[in-house]
Amino acid sequence: MNDALGDPQSVLVLGGTSEIALATVRALPRNRLKRVVLAGRPSPARDAAIAALTGAGIQGVSAIDFEAKNTTEHAVLINQVFDAGDIDIVLLAFGILGSQDEGEANPDLAVEVATTNYTGAVSVGLRVAARLKSQGHGSLVVFSSVAGDRARRSNFIYGSTKAGLDAFAQGLGDALHGSGANVLVVRPGMVRTKMTTGMPEAPMTTDPEVVGKIVVAGLRKGKNTVYAPGPLRFVMTALKTLPRPVFRRLPQ
Amino acid sequence: MSNKSPLRLDEGEQLLTGWGRTSPSLAKVVPVSTVEQVQQCIKVSGPRGVLARGLGRSYGDAAQSGGASVLDLTAMSTIALTASTGSVRVGAGASIHDLLLATVPAGFFVPVTAGTRHVTVGGAIAADIHGKNHHVEGSFGSHVSEIQLVDGRGAPQSLTPDDPQTRERFWATVGGMGLTGVMTEATFKMLPITSSMMSVDTERCADLDDVMARMIERDSQYRYSVAWIDSVSATGRGVLTRGDHAAVDQLPVAKRATALDYGPKALASAPGLIPGGLLNKFTVRAFNEAWYRKAPKSEQGALQPISEFFHPLDFVKDWNRVYGPGGFVQYQFVVPDGAAEIIGIALRKLQGVGAPSFLTVLKRFGAANPAPLSFPQPGWTLAADVPAGIPGLAAVLDELDELVANAGGRLYLAKDSRQSPEMFVRTYPLLTQWQRTRNQMDPKGIFKSDLARRLSL
Ligand SMILES: Cc1cc2nc3c(=O)[nH]c(=O)nc-3n(C[C@H](O)[C@H](O)[C@H](O)COP(=O)(O)OP(=O)(O)OC[C@H]3O[C@@H](n4cnc5c(N)ncnc54)[C@H](O)[C@@H]3O)c2cc1C
Ligand SMILES: NC(=O)c1ccc[n+]([C@@H]2O[C@H](COP(=O)([O-])OP(=O)(O)OC[C@H]3O[C@@H](n4cnc5c(N)ncnc54)[C@H](OP(=O)(O)O)[C@@H]3O)[C@@H](O)[C@H]2O)c1
């Protein structure tokens, strides 16, 4: 349970090696934090994430196996985590960028992006929401993307999964309104993580630490949506109003 | 598998908070009016358990429990006074307000009252509340002769402090924050009075040392004593008010025939000083200044109605909203006499973080009672309201906790909404004894509150 000053006791990270999610965990107030569960596929990266958080002075960090595409396993997993104690904050942070060109050439790869980013999130998101509602409190943070605000020629496969995820998360937030549980939708622009390594930097590219701070501030204020960095909200509002022919001609 | 969406609100589900309006959680609120209904709720309890709630005047998360069935006992409010003995048997959901309306005209006052009369008898026992008379008469639980309770197995029982069979369960329930069972009734002794007026001595004190010296010197001569401290002033100046019930012959002759009239709704006499709108540094400063100036420099034996002396805040409906949507915490601790300097340190630290408090209250406690989780112990207790959203507050309160714990003091669970489990365990040394009794009374762990989960009680 968050205490009166908003300090959480427990966090579940879905996508336990996500650099943005780990930066968010580091940005959380730690005075009362005693349980952090990193859900993800077993890997040296996952072990390293446990070690890094523990090394940063965070207590009670552990891992649990989670594969976003295996939706039939999600119910057991989520129940196991919540049966061991209330979760105050869930970070839904798994996702893959995929390659637009390869996806167009080999639609099976596009389906993998869709299954991971959208289907996997629907499966685990609904189960998390049900548990938050039945414990009567808690926040679900969903990492969407500005790529979902308006689909672009250069990455509409990924963008469309984020558009779907974003709409899903907004609806879920409305469903939970008044239940003590809430959903925060986070729309980062380009962030310097392993997901974007080697790609040319877009304007307003930022770091995971910046996103983490914005998420923590948004949680504290009880926001429904935050952009990271914040001013992207205005950029995206403007972009969304452009007519298709104009939008198409923008540098991609 | 059911087709009903688990995301929809069920009937009776509501968001609950304490008086500080922080950390809401959703629970199914179930009104109960008989012992059988209480037993039934315990019998069908789900995985999130059951909790009794009174009027929600605890500040933090003691009277809420996410996902649980929260029993609203306010309909269990019968009052049976035996005038010959002054003993009263009361439904646990009856409030001190109800009780005073029924008993003051008959010449009786409650043995202990909080700073608000809108607390239930169940809440008063569960938190073992203290009043301005603690230094001479102890806390609420010390005046109770019998508790009717339904435990975690659904078994109704009568608990008294004298019967060796029930003694431990009685004291585990006093101060037990609803975690040993649901109280349905209690019996206690009322104080005989001959008028509904108080005879009050007021002294303005130049600084904190002056306040404390005067309290040490003469508190023992008064039944009731409390000091209000100007939390904004650099010196910790304050106003000390002490007194007792006025005897009928202290009243003007014309008032004696109606000496026991009691009408707490007389809003005309409201202090009317609490600022309207949201609090900020300026309104708090103005309020503190006005409150200090309003008090006479020195006055003896002034007559004041019961409600003005004991329950001035009750004149302002919903005053807890002045702190805005972020809510507030009330930081209340006790330290032994030997650590009196912590009072001044705490005031300065709260000032340092820019925490505007318009009601900061200092009081002396007398002897503790045997209840393992009862808060009062001999020494000084300070209570200050602080808006929850102040940057840096968490760290400053943690620092204060450390000082309080090192000095052998502790925090009041009825006000707490943020202490760490470690702080709690360290400062309530009788916790394991209490847990043993609680486990006997509630072997399956049915009674759960957000506070209990937060502190791993
Ligand atoms: C303005 C103000 C002034 C105050 N001044 C004082 C003061 O001077 N001294 C003091 O000691 N306190 C003071 N308090 C705190 C208050 O007295 C306590 O929090 C008290 O417990 C509130 O009673 P309630 O009926 O509202 O109980 P709630 O807040 O609803 O519940 C408090 C606890 O009691 C339990 N409980 C309630 N009913 C039952 C029952 N029937 N059976 C079992 N458990 C039950 C709940 O589970 C919970 O743990 C003050 C509060 C306010 C708002
Ligand atoms: N970086 C950006 O520019 C950016 C911008 C906007 C939005 N986002 C979104 O923010 C979130 C976090 O991104 P990030 O930058 O932190 O990326 P990241 O470091 O690459 O993390 C992605 C995470 O997703 C996990 N994951 C991928 N496929 C999975 C699967 N099938 N099952 C379980 N876990 C799987 C990865 O786990 P493994 O270690 O097992 O691979 C990893 O933990 C993502 O949803 C991303 O789409 C990122």
Image (cartoon, coloured by chain):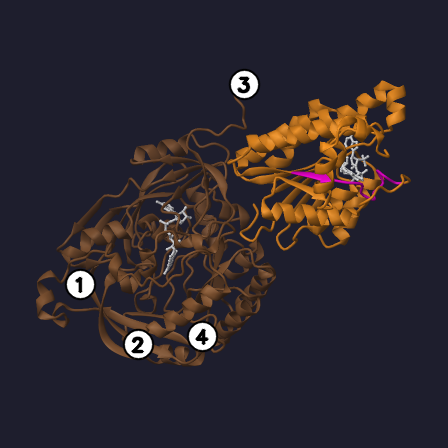
Chain colours: A orange, B brown
Q: Which residues are magenta?
A: A185-197
Q: Is residue B4 left or right of residue A218?
A: left
- The reply to whether label 3 and label 1 mark residues of one chain is yes
* Label 4: which secondary element: helix
Q: Vertical placement of A49 versus B10: above or below? A: below
Q: Nearer the viewer, residue A99 or B333?
A: A99
- The reply to whether label 2 and label 3 mark residues of one chain is yes
Q: Nearer the viewer, mark 3 or mark 1?
A: 3
State the image coordinates of residue B250 (x, y, percent, origin top left).
14, 72
Chain containing the residue with disc 4: B
Q: Residues within 10 Å of mark 3 (few under 14, many from 20)?
A: few
Q: Tell me the amino acid under the disc marked 3.
A: Asn
Q: Vertical placement of B166 versus A95: above or below? A: below
Q: Nearer the viewer, mark 3 or mark 4?
A: 3
As for residue A189 lying within the magenta part, the answer is yes
Task: Determine contact: label 3, label 1, CB under 8 Å.
Answer: no
Can you see residue B91? Answer: yes
Between the C-alphas of marks 3 and 4, the distance is: 62 Å
Between the C-alphas of marks 2 and 4, the distance is: 29 Å
Q: Residue tagged by mark 4?
A: B337
Of labels 2 and 4, earlier in sequence is 2
Chain containing the residue with disc 3: B
Ligand 2 in which quarter = top right
* Label 2: which secondary element: loop
Q: Which mark is residue B193?
A: 1
The quarter of the picture where residue B219 lies is: bottom left
Q: Which mark is residue B296?
A: 2
The quarter of the picture where residue B105 lies is: bottom left
Q: Which quarter of the rendered picture does the N terminus of chain A lie within?
A: top right
- What kind of secondary structure does the magenta stretch mostly adopt? loop
